Amino acid sequence: MATITTQYQTFLLDVSDKIAHVRFNRPEKANSLAQQGWNELEAIFTELDQRSDVRVIILSGEGRNFCAGIDLSMFSSLQDFHSSDEGRKREHIRDSAKRLQAPINAIENCRKPVLAAIQRACVGGGVDIISACDMRYCTEDAFFSIEEINIGMVADLGTLQRLPRLIGEGITRELAYTGRRMSGEEAYRRHLVNQVFEDKETMMTTVLEIAEQIASKSPLSIRGTKQVLNYSRDHSVTDGLEYIATWNAGMFMSDDLTEAITAKMTGRDPQFED
């Protein structure tokens, strides 16, 4: 199948064989994101959520680094809001934070699984972003840092809310209070990443293979599985069981179920509608 490529100002998007590959494309700035980048990130994942030709998404970075987070030049824009009223100034800062949270929420809320492939720097907003992905993979030279504490601020785009669920409270607090770097090997030990690879090429080959496996499954069931996992993470076991019972009451009797069983019985690969 032909690859469809879309170039944004700060991203590249390739779609081929039901797999979307989103790449940070600002390598000269360590793939840090200015306002345009955040806007594009939200637009891309909102679009991919709705695209029927996409079943799974890979997120990676061009150049040496994965993502250095927010472009520090953006902090000056907070000074551009002029008002003599202190309350309105504070409201503007709060609204700015909420606008930057939205692109990361779009990753988490996208119904297609998102696989992050990380090399070298993943700091600040980069950690916010990967915390919202479904799975994470990295190279041996990768490092992770809650960089916000090093510039005198509190991380406000999702790391402090999502990371404890991935690596635990104690290690999250250590990283958040010290701003130290977590290596790729430690990230694996702490269960932040699924696998560590010697180099980017090997990592991308394996991540693509995993994406291909996901893309071969029932897209309706994959979307449902992600939504049920996210719901169950944020609710009690009882609530989660109630949710999946209702979900399957509505989605269980699909053509995908018939196709999967028939293909298994006849020894062929199933073919699912998008």
Image: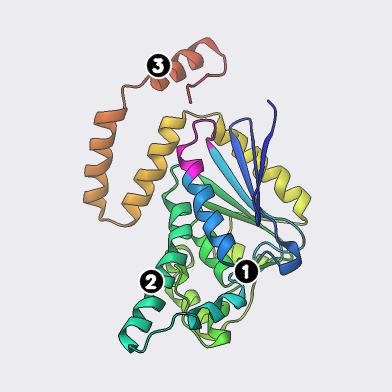
Kindly identify which residue carries mark 2: 95
On the question of residue 267 being in view, the answer is: yes
* Nearer to us in this view, 148 or 92: 92
Residue 19 versus residue 94 in the image, above or below: above
Q: Is residue 54 magenta?
A: yes
The residue wearing badge 3 is 258
Q: Quadrant of the N terminus?
A: top right
Region in magenta: 47-55
Residue placed at 61% from the left, 46% from the top? 58
Task: Name which residue lies at 45% across and 16% down.
Answer: 259
Real-space CA distance between mark 2 and mark 3, rounded to the nearest whole angstrom: 48 Å
Q: Earlier in the sequence, mark 2 or mark 1?
A: 2
* SS assignment at label 2: helix
Quote the CA–CA distance across marks 3 and 1: 44 Å
Amino acid at the residue labelled 1: Glu
188 left or right of 140?
A: left
For mark 1, what is the residue? Answer: 186
Using residue 126 as the reference point, say whether residue 242 is left or right of it. left
**How many residues crowd around disc 2 within 10 Å: few (fewer than 14), some, or many (20 or more)?**
few
